[in-house]
Image: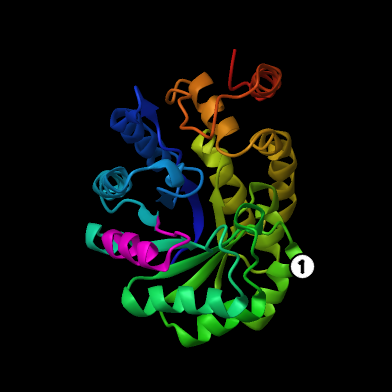
Amino acid sequence: MFSGVYTALITPFKDGKVDFDALERLIENQYENGVDGVVPCGTTGESPTLTYEEHEAVIEFCVKNAKGRMKVLAGTGSNSTDEAIYFTRSAKNAGCDGALVVSPYYNKPTQKGLYLHFKTIADTVNIPIVLYNIAGRTSVNIEPATIAKLFEDCKNIIGVKEASGLVDQMSIIKSLVPDIELFSGDDALTLPSLSIGGVGVISVLSNIVPAKVVSLVRTFEKGDIKEAMKIHYRLFPLIKSMFIETNPIPVKTAASLLGICRADLRLPICEMEEANRLKLEKILKDFDLLK
């Protein structure tokens, strides 16, 4: 159902509000560079600081501007099951192709609690769901056995964005659930995850260099592994630069330097430290993205 390159979209801001003009340009650039889908209102889109109205408006805007040319996998997760159901139902009503549902943050539920959280959402809203596992941001890991049970019990849970950073865990998931659509949640692990049966990446980097990320995945899919490795290693320093501070600070700063949108962020996410900004500028220049 989902495969290839999906961009975890930044949410452009201007004067404290969502900059829909910049968002439209960003979406169009993704389409023109061959991206398969966009993911609005995820962590990279600063979803925790969007109002309900903004969250829904951004998703509706993405569906409208994707125009059926790309799929829209909307971020609808929350640490409240009821709130996640609300956003997931809203995404379905907006015409999204699916929902990306992150594990609850701060609550630190047990594996049983995680199972019940995701099952309740899946049972309540009939839309394809991709689980989002990122313990580094939520402080709880969705164990492979829990993912396998959810996949077995909930027919509309079809995939997982695995951002544990552990290829070993990805391998366990695929061994338990061979048919699950496994997305890398880390740009640095796109190639390794493809090599063990992953279907693609939900990428931060593709906000600024979508064609390069698409090239990596397409080259691997064509069977040219050596060339895919070359692309991976060429991109690796740029990938690492996207995480010299908390995501999405670096990618949004890079987007502003490249004229895509302003670098405006919402507290408690704040502007990049000057020393890191200079490092980022140098890397962008090294990649001939910035003069």
| Residue farthest front in this picture | 107
Estimate the x, y position of residue 83 in percent, counting from the top left. Answer: 36, 62
Q: Nearer the viewer, residue 89 or 163?
A: 89
Answer yes or no: is residue 260 visible.
yes
Question: What colour-coding does the image apply?
Answer: rainbow
Q: Quadrant of residue 15?
A: top left
In the rendered image, residue 17, in percent from the top left (x then y), is placed at 32, 30
How many numbered discs sit on the rendered protein?
1
Quadrant of the frame with the C terminus:
top right
Residue lying at the far top in this picture: please name it.
291
Point out the image quarter for the N terminus. Answer: bottom left
Amino acid type of the residue that numbered disc 1 sits on in the rendered structure: Asp
SS class, disc 1? helix
* Residue 82, above or below 11: below
Residue 53 locus on image (x, y percent)? 26, 45
> Which residue bears the numbered disc 1?
168
Magenta: main secondary structure: helix
Q: Give the residue displayed 49% in from the left and 79% down from the top.
A: 116
> Could you say which is closer to the camera, residue 103 or residue 226?
103
Mark 1 burial class by Cα count in 10 Å: few <14, some 14-19, many 20+: few
Q: Residue 73: x, y in percent?
A: 40, 57
From this view, report whether residue 277 is shown above or below residue 232: above
Image: magenta residue range? 75-91
